[in-house]
Image (spheres, grey):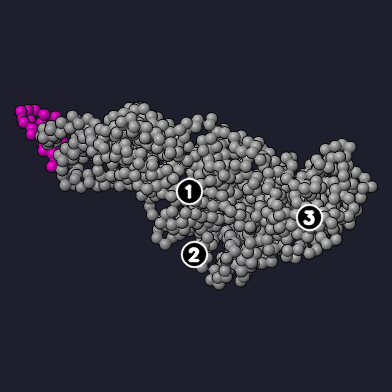
Amino acid sequence: MIFQLPWLLAALAILPVLWLLLRTLPPPPQRRAFPAIMLLRGLRARVTQAATAPLWLLLLRCVALAALIVGLAGPVLRQDRAGQPAPGGQGAEQIIVLDNGWAAVPDWPRRLAAIDAVLDRATHPVRLLTTAPGLAGEAPSVGAPTPPSLLRGMVDSTRPMPWPTDRAAATRALRDLASGGWHGRVVYVSDGLASTDAPAFAAALTALGPVQTLIDRDATIAVLTPAPANGDQQLHVAISTLPLPHPRQLTVRAEAMDGGVLSLVPVPVAAGARNGSAGVALPAELRNRIGRLVLRDMPGPAGVRLLDEGDRRRPVGLIGVAGTDTPLVGTLFYLRRALSPTAELREGPALTLLKRPLSILIAPDGALDSPETRRIVTEWVRKGGMLIRFAGPLLNGSPDHDPTAPDSGMDSGNPAASSPLPDALLPVPLMDGERQLGGAMSWGKPEHLAPFPDDSPFHGLAVPADVTVSRQVLARPAADLATHSWARLTDGTPLVTHAALGAGEVVLFHVTSTAEWSNLPLSGLFVDMLRRLAERSVGIDAPADHSLLAPYMTLDADATLSPPPPAARALPSDAFGTTPASAAHPPGLYGPRASRRALNLGDVIGPLAAQSTIGHEVTLSGQSRDRALGPWLVAAALLLLALDAMLTLLLRAGRLSGRKAALTGAILLATLSSPARADPRPDGVPGAALETRLGYIQTGHADIDAVSREGLQGLSDYTNARTSAVLGHPDGVVPDRDDLSYYPMLYWPVVADATIDPARTAALNAYMRHGGILLIDSQGVDPAVPGTGSPSGAGFAAQAPGTAAALRRMTRGLDVPPLTRLTDKHVLAHTFYLLHSFPGRYDGLPVWVAREGDSANDGVSPVIIGSSDWAHAWAVDAQGDTPYATVPDGSTQRVMAYRFGVNAVLYALTGNYKADQVHVPALLRRLGE
């Protein structure tokens, strides 16, 4: 402990004098009769001795005055928890080396506080070295000696950088300082990450003098990295982190570009593990709205992964024909394997596929034989779709390539050019028959592929030497045939042709989709070609060469997209995914909108490793700022003096004896020093008995139960703000353990692993018989149930596999009355708000209630069953935000979901009293008669 004004402590020497002065106590007043004549009787001089103050009061006064003197002297409590003097002493010259790369973002305020504590003790000018390159791309350099008071302002304005540190450049700067003869104390504020040049960096630090390393070994350092495709229909997230000795569960938010949360993904990380991964289970329509993944436990650019069009899983329709499922020879066999890692595949008849949004429609040979099918597909292509066709014997024998047919309206780039039929859906006219290349009956041999032309979307792809074509359909020679050809054989004949049709495009592979005419479907080139077409189908013109893409918006240290820094440079389009983030190429979005690419910090990063110890190591909290005790001591002295004044008045009034006054003072001190406590709730009385609360049935899944709690809390707050109902905090209940009679409504989410529980069933039956309402929510549609919901709802609702069977298990044995679909004629639709739809997070899905007219439970439905995921729509987090997006109508749909919840709550509280309103028109007519 140190004192800012130590000379004030000399005042403690007068405490003995104060002891003598404070011993006196004014005499108490005396009660006397006051007859006027008696005034003259006592006229003689008398010496009155003052009373003596009790010992405890003298001690109280001395302690108060001592605390006041010491407090005014400015005592400061040193917070150096290392328990030993800093290496090199406080008076030596110092240099502060600060890691300010991306790994320092999470606990940046603590790092600044630790540096401020170091500067508090510094008595000489201090140098500063930051190890990350600056915004202008300047390399790390040692600053000039600066007084601690001025350096404090410079440090407080320092910001971490959204790219890694450059310890190699920092090592050179330290060696230059050492070569100049500098020697002193080194304070190294480490981010905790090891690097390839760590040994040289450590040697450069120790060469300058004794090193004190400030580091937090328990900090969570993690980065979102690319996840390899598993061949399933999910978007996968991967996390690389420093290993810790205990298991953890990190959470990743899938966010739209407007900040709405589409999904929360828990990612488990085992004890001692460096990596963790999980899948994002969302339908393709929602998945393609994800703009970025955010790691909730890691602020900064390391916890953000921006997605571009390459990360989208575009819906691709495969038109099924006879024999498509035959292994190795089926027309869709190779297409499935080529597209499944990067696309959302849907199979079926063309008319069924086009009822939902599609990016690409692939038609193998014979899939478009029907004129009606071709007409509908043509309309779809004109609106912006891409049709990919494959040749074959059926196409070769069809009338599609009849040269005498009228114009189809294909846009060839030449107004005078035309293609054969209105319903042909072929990019170029075809010749009769097919071309045989090689074989027992042919003089020729299979042809190889020529390099792709510059204007082809396949440009830049390597052509394997072993890919050959043995049979093809030939395009009819035309002057503009070259402009329609994206791929050719070495003899110049087209292999892939294209043409625009309205706002869409038609592409034809002049070979089959199987290995019958070519071994192209067996090669990796086939996969790459289809992937390029998928990118083109959504308007992405991603360059395949060394075209430079300029930075559009980059991430700063707060993971916010902002204009690029001065040092940002363009990046070749084929360098994404292999270029590490740096000052020249900061993480962010690059290129124009039509070909935008994302560069992320985790794209090129090796396994994370903890930094080895350098010098004397202490934690960041070991360099906390000194704590001033003066204000607290002065406040305590004033409090004691106020207590002394009050007790002195009581003693003078004679209302307290010395012993009672001491006891009173002790009680007052204990009362003032102890925190106020609210009256506890009576033992054994649940909170739901003292206020109206909603309840949710616990599922055993922490994430689902948390959403149920947040959802009912949001609904309770909304109901309190807009109705006269007063609802408390929701409770999680276990039916066979807790008393359910306190809750007017229970929310019950369906989970796929739900089991039958006779005790739970009996408790819920008793609950419903006594007027309670169960709101059962499967939170999505089960893909195993065909025709669930309307097309609008099913298109956006998340898949909840296994919930249909789980719902049957959960409700087995429950006294569920006959159900009917909820309409706007039901009482529930106008209990408070007049509703015509009942959305949750998803819209358009049916809601089921008990059939009206049932005399049981006074006509009130004991169950409400749906799949709209109301809890996520109602949920409000600790910051007051609504973290889950509602689709497809956003905030308007969320308001309607809240209104449905309010109607459900009031329906549970008031029953069917509004059912009589249906008779109002008849009553009015009768009164009119």
Q: Percent position (x, y) of residue 246?
A: 42, 57
Identify the residue at image location x=54%, y=55%. 277
Instruction: Name the mark nearer the viewer: 3 or 1.
Output: 3
The N terminus - image quarter = top left
Q: Quadrant of residue 406?
A: top right
Q: Give the mark nearest the N terminus, 3 or 1.
A: 1
Q: Nearer the viewer, residue 427 or 295?
A: 427
Residue 283 forms part of the magenta stretch: no
- The reply to whether callout 1 and callout 2 are in contact (CB within 8 Å) is no
Q: Which mark is residue 738?
A: 2
Identified at 10% across, 31% down, the residue is: 38
Residue 686: % across, % down: 45, 59
For residue 209, the mark is none
Image coordinates for residue 327, horizontal then vertical, percent: 73, 65
Secondary structure under the numbered disc 2 in the rendered image: loop
Residue 48 lies in magenta, yes or no? yes
Q: Amino acid at mark 1?
A: Ala
Query: Helix, strand, or loop for circle 1?
Result: strand
In primary-sequence order, the first of circles 2 and 3 is: 3
**Disc 2 to disc 3, how far (Cα)?**
77 Å
Q: State how far apart marks 3 and 1 are (Cα).
A: 53 Å
Give the residue at x 73% y 40%. 454
320 shown above or below 536: below
Residue drawn at x 33%, y 33% as measured from the top left: 178
Which stretch appears magenta? Answer: 28-55
Q: Amino acid at mark 3?
A: Pro
Q: Position of residue 705 (x, y in %)?
A: 53, 57
Vertical placement of residue 698 versus 257, above or below? below
Asked if residue 617 can be seen in this view, the reply is yes
Residue identifier under label 3: 446
Q: Residues within 10 Å of mark 2 (few under 14, many from 20)?
A: few
